[in-house]
Amino acid sequence: MSKQEQIQVVLAGLNAAVPEIKGSLLASLDGMPIAYALKVGTVDPARIAAMTATALSVGKRTSESLGAGTLQEVHFAGTEGRIFVYTVAGRAALTVVTPMDTNVGLIGLEARDMVNKLLAII
Amino acid sequence: MKHSAVTPLKLIISGPVGAGKTTFVSTLSEDPVVNSDEQTTEEIGKTHTTVALDFGRFVLQGRPLHLFGTPGQSRFDFMWEILSEGALGLLLLVAGDRPADFPQALSILRFITSRNPMPFIIAVTRQDSKGAWGPEKIAGYFAVPTTRVIGIDARNAQSSLGAVTCLLSLIEGSTSGNSRNPFHSTSHSTSNSNVKEST
Ligand SMILES: Nc1nc2c(ncn2[C@@H]2O[C@H](COP(=O)(O)OP(=O)(O)OP(=O)(O)O)[C@@H](O)[C@H]2O)c(=O)[nH]1
Ligand SMILES: [Mg+2]
């Protein structure tokens, strides 16, 4: 299995572990999609990858400037859903999209688990 | 609390990858630049690329200037839009020795000025490079008056300052009603099709 396929399997595993997850995507820090499993059909992975790279970058500077240390994750909460962006050892960004009423703690646990699996691959 | 008495002037610095936007903002800024360069995973001729913005500031003749550098790649076009909001002028950087990037430069220029009409100057970098296009030839390519185009070295403070000064006098001229921005009068739609075709 290629790296890409292995990552795809991990992302699909995450989506399966928490069925309410609408999609997940792994991107490089310069905003290129590496792999994704998106249930929402209309989103363009290339744009999501770029936007999450930007968000993580801004989060990183904000976190450092305000004394919050090294950035680990960024959360967005909209009226319809939530978006979580996790750093993968400062080498990639894992984005997870969920509905509004998701179990935030559970997502955090599962996503951290996935980050470790992804680290073993990339 | 820190605050300045004079409202800062916001300028946006845009242009294709490797044109020298991050270098330009770093050269002129008095404070350490808020920069957002990340390691590239593509072959773009350098190791790092901007993914959010470059923010730098300095004071020119008692007037605080805020410089906002954009990413150069089209996948970050949402940042071109965000950063150009409220900007008083655009400095479009173009590497004179990279004609292949000129269409991208034109796309960025249209993208920004069609959404937020503002005075702009084109600064042509890498004039020291063999075979680089000079300001006059660039003015021809972009179909703008030669007074709108200046050759600079983004690594050099005096040279970079020249581009800012040039843009500031254009802004001053346009606020007193003398603006002749060729991109104001033409009916560029708000679609970004011109950006897509260049990628
Ligand atoms: N020889 C030469 N090099 C220059 C000149 N101006 C800028 N450079 C160099 O060109 C490179 C420009 O890189 P950046 O400043 O990162 O370019 P950028 O426009 O921010 O690129 P992205 O953020 O990737 O879109 C740097 O290595 C500069 O040192 C110039 O006038 N002459
Ligand atoms: Mg840059």
Image: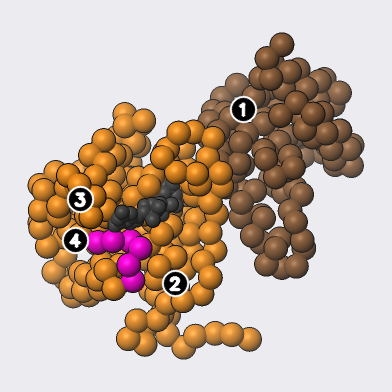
Look at label 4 and name its amino acid: Ile
Quadrant into which the N terminus of chain A falls:
top right
Label 4 chain ID: B
The numbered disc on residue B183 is: 3
Can the viewer see residue B34? Answer: yes
In this rendering, position of residue B92 left or right of residue B25 = left
Label 2 chain ID: B
* Disc nearest the viewer among 2 and 3: 2
Secondary structure at numbered mark 1: strand
Secondary structure at numbered mark 4: strand
For the residues beneath circles 2 and 3, the answer to whether they share a chain is: yes
| Residue nearest the viewer, comparing B73 with B108 | B73
- Is the residue marked 1 within 8 Å of ligand 1, measured from its CB? no
Q: Please report contact status of discs 2 and 4: CB closer than 8 Å, yes or no.
A: no
- Residue shown at 44%/72% (left/top)? B29
Look at label 1 and name its amino acid: Ile
Q: Position of residue A56 (x, y in %)?
A: 64, 48
Q: How much space separates mark 1 and mark 4, taking CA atoms? A: 40 Å
Look at label 2 and name its amino acid: Ser
Q: Which residue is mark 4?
A: B150
Secondary structure at numbered mark 2: loop
Q: Which residue is mark 1?
A: A34
